Amino acid sequence: MWIYEKKLQYPARVCKADVKMAKYLIAQYGGPDGELAAALRYQTQRYTMPTGQSKATLTDIGTEEFAHLEIIATLVFKLLKGVPVEILKREGLGENYTEHGRGIFYSDTTGMPWTASYIQCKDDVIADLTEDMAAEEKARSTYEHLINLTDDPCVKDTLKFLREREIVHFQRFGETLGRVREFYESKKFY
Amino acid sequence: MWIYEKKLQYPARVCKADVKMAKYLIAQYGGPDGELAAALRYQTQRYTMPTGQSKATLTDIGTEEFAHLEIIATLVFKLLKGVPVEILKREGLGENYTEHGRGIFYSDTTGMPWTASYIQCKDDVIADLTEDMAAEEKARSTYEHLINLTDDPCVKDTLKFLREREIVHFQRFGETLGRVREFYESKKFY
Amino acid sequence: MWIYEKKLQYPARVCKADVKMAKYLIAQYGGPDGELAAALRYQTQRYTMPTGQSKATLTDIGTEEFAHLEIIATLVFKLLKGVPVEILKREGLGENYTEHGRGIFYSDTTGMPWTASYIQCKDDVIADLTEDMAAEEKARSTYEHLINLTDDPCVKDTLKFLREREIVHFQRFGETLGRVREFYESKKFY
Amino acid sequence: MWIYEKKLQYPARVCKADVKMAKYLIAQYGGPDGELAAALRYQTQRYTMPTGQSKATLTDIGTEEFAHLEIIATLVFKLLKGVPVEILKREGLGENYTEHGRGIFYSDTTGMPWTASYIQCKDDVIADLTEDMAAEEKARSTYEHLINLTDDPCVKDTLKFLREREIVHFQRFGETLGRVREFYESKKFY
Amino acid sequence: MWIYEKKLQYPARVCKADVKMAKYLIAQYGGPDGELAAALRYQTQRYTMPTGQSKATLTDIGTEEFAHLEIIATLVFKLLKGVPVEILKREGLGENYTEHGRGIFYSDTTGMPWTASYIQCKDDVIADLTEDMAAEEKARSTYEHLINLTDDPCVKDTLKFLREREIVHFQRFGETLGRVREFYESKKFY
Amino acid sequence: MWIYEKKLQYPARVCKADVKMAKYLIAQYGGPDGELAAALRYQTQRYTMPTGQSKATLTDIGTEEFAHLEIIATLVFKLLKGVPVEILKREGLGENYTEHGRGIFYSDTTGMPWTASYIQCKDDVIADLTEDMAAEEKARSTYEHLINLTDDPCVKDTLKFLREREIVHFQRFGETLGRVREFYESKKFY
């Protein structure tokens, strides 16, 4: 079970009004390679992991991704808060306003609702960890696109932090994959 | 952010081998009215709630629903663990085995992957809380169907606990709706 | 069965060219909380309702929602009729034009096709009627967003009529829920 | 707008308990080529039809398909009414029971919720009417599969009536296509 | 099996920078009536075709549609190559850039990922070929919308070639339908 | 463009009637990790690959996956051909028969239609190739599940061939990733 602690893992600061950026950022909330996809993928794969270390790694990183989801939501919330309807219309967020007001929904940047079809769980530790490494690379790539789309130094700072975390997770999944291979080899030979 | 505590909110015990029940239980994992739907719905609606109490209620219940998700996963994991392929085939889980082995995936009982289309967030506290009350009633109803589908007293016990929690949540959302109405009336008149 | 009468339940007038509004209005045609979702939800829930009055209420309101669907389609049709391709492009409807010309399709404002995942039918009168009350609140909220998005007094007038009907439906579902509870209590005790 | 008349277009009789048939019949309720798909397709294409006759044909047939939807729902309702949970489980309807009890939902036979992706509206009378002719052929083919799947003479009788209607609709769409071509040619030359 | 030949069936030339056109063209890549839908529909229907000629026609046209898919991809790739992020943002492609950079994805113009729900395979030669004729008409109609959306003579030239091919395919499916009817009649009487 | 050669890359032999296996095999036709997903993923990623070798690898392997798709379809076609309706019903293929007769459709084992949400294209060579390596591991894992689900030596033989190809593809993607890294390093330093 989880305990909620009322603080963000990293500050979600916004220095500049940039309504369009709210729409792009939603990619990391409910998009195919976003934080929700990562969190849910790892939390369900852990049940069939073969070792304590691999289970723990998936639980830890999965829990951290929920914290990242909260950072993204906070950025989007700040970017949209109090923005007049006229500006939402002009900047291409009239569609979002119609369906969700200034609320935050689990969709990709084009309004496609999040689907579990984005993720997989094979009950095969090699396949699952390789998929997790790919997930981290795809999330890193999306963060790089997002960093190119803004010139707000505060938003950039938060996105760079999140981008760095994906690289760290990629490495941890790589190490876990190595250890799991060792575990299977030790079981076979001794 | 969240902190993971390595314990279940309530024991997930299984007394009887019943592979088919694993398939039915998945309704509360990745089905339209399941625990994932509840957790994600409340966690995203909280950003546009108008009062501290309503924000806190959604955060608390949303966090508890993640704990319920974990209970359901544990039941399914126990029901499927070590079951031979022949029995999975005979009991109608050959399809699941093909795609996910004995792993647990976010789908409804028929294999339809979870989609955010099941949930909504309107940035309208009356609409959002009424939708939450409906969500709890629909989850209660699914638990009642599941209780009718098994005669395993252990599984029944866990499902009854979860069913009770939905009723408590329904009441808490009802109270929150009352308080929010009071808050708006007090703002209007003074 | 239904008989078609060639008239609208309420006039669908447009006083001002406003192509973008056609895109927003589609929310109430094929969006998650629109008239199609309402009509189809009530028409299928009626089969398992326990009393004649609850069956009749769902049939009546379900039939009225089809009339609303027609009003929305007429508004969209009038807003798009004869608009040159250049203006559709400039106003953000080039995508719609590519796929559907000036035709009207069952999607939300972002182009996501309507899916039955938006609605539910639990064979549980309490759950179903609570979901219906939530549906009416969500539709009301969408109409309020739409009213904020236009300054055409004719479109506003039609939207206000439709918004009022949702409030009336909400109340009728509430009364039906009360009566159904009475029915079950009377059955228990006498 | 529509007026509901409390009678079925054709009797929906069931002579034999056959729970599995309820599952197959749902194809014509919420499946890709079912009555809902037909009704909604024609009702939305009519707005951009070029002649009074083509508009009227789509409205008429679209309205009749809603009557067929009601016939299918009545068959399914009768086949499922009062069937004990144990038999639903044994006959492969435990999944449906978990999510919807004995209620009727808009999905295909495998539980996939109905989606507007099944249908199209191109604002091109030739393309739209050709798609409608294909829709009628696909529905006819599904009815033939369903007739092969049952040996209940009552259900067969109803299905044969519905199959015949699809053939009549196919012919009416063909005639309408012919007339529309004549209309365009007359406009070109005189 | 297939052998890849490194040439396009028809030149994919672009004379004018027109980023928005890249977004519209994607309709024929991953949209409901696009080349992918056509190719996959014919390739899977061929297995249950009753005659050698009908099998061969579906295989041939299905293979040609893959060549068309490649032409569309090449047009989109050329239109997007090297376009600065600022221009992508201004022209309404910021969402695509966030998720896919300047890559090409199987979605419709609004970002909805391609789904097999767009196509059908009934194991009924009349239904399948009628659906194929409808598919060709819908694709023709989309090409006409696209031709109206651009004034680049090079892009128009390629689109006109592709539009012509759809008309030829429509005719070939019509002839195949005629021959299949003859085949069945000859089988019945001799 | 592609040229069709009327032969299979590897024989698709079936020694034993096993209708259920047809349903499971469909996983590799239209499932999340099947041959269609692989073929389409590689064919679209190739446009933004940075080197001739990486483009060629994706084109080659993508073309081979279409050949595998054809092998799977042939196996399914043989397993279903001429099987009486009664047996399809008994073995759990009555749903498929209702919608598709004995035809082959792009869905997963549970009837969920194939969706492009399963795949990704990031215009980032590292992310794309890592995703491709994960795709091959997931396909290998599905083949292993399928091999466990049958005791037909002919079907097993074909599945083992296909499984081996996935391992070879995984290695080729790994080598390509290595070469691409070298390419970028050489560009940076000289």
Image: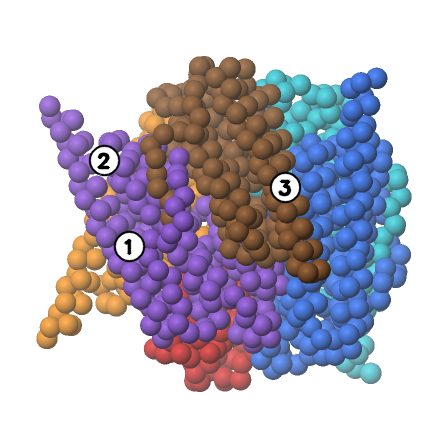
Chain colours: A blue, B cyan, C red, D orange, E purple, F brown
Q: Amino acid at mark 3?
A: Glu
Name the residue that disc number 1 marks: E166
x and y, in percent, of residue C70 in the image: 41, 66
Quarter occupied by residue B120: bottom right
Q: Amino acid at mark 1?
A: Glu
Earlier-in-chain disc, 2 versus 1:
2
Q: Nearer the viewer, residue C153 or A9?
A: A9
x and y, in percent, of residue B9 in the image: 85, 40
Query: Where E136 falls versus F160 (above or below)?
Result: below
CA distance for labels 2 and 3: 44 Å
Name the residue that disc number 3 marks: F175
Q: Nearer the viewer, mark 2 or mark 3?
A: 3
Q: Locate residue B66 relative to residue A18 in the image: left or right.
A: right
Q: Amino acid at mark 2?
A: Gln
Query: Where A22 falls versus F56 (above or below)?
Result: below
Query: Where B6 falls versus C171 (above or below)?
Result: above
Query: Where E118 falls versus F156 (above or below)?
Result: below
Q: Residue at x 74, y 79 (%)?
A: A16
Q: Chain of mark 3?
A: F
Q: Residue at x 48, y 77 (%)?
A: C91
Name the residue that disc number 2 marks: E53
Tell me the number on the disc at residue C99.
none
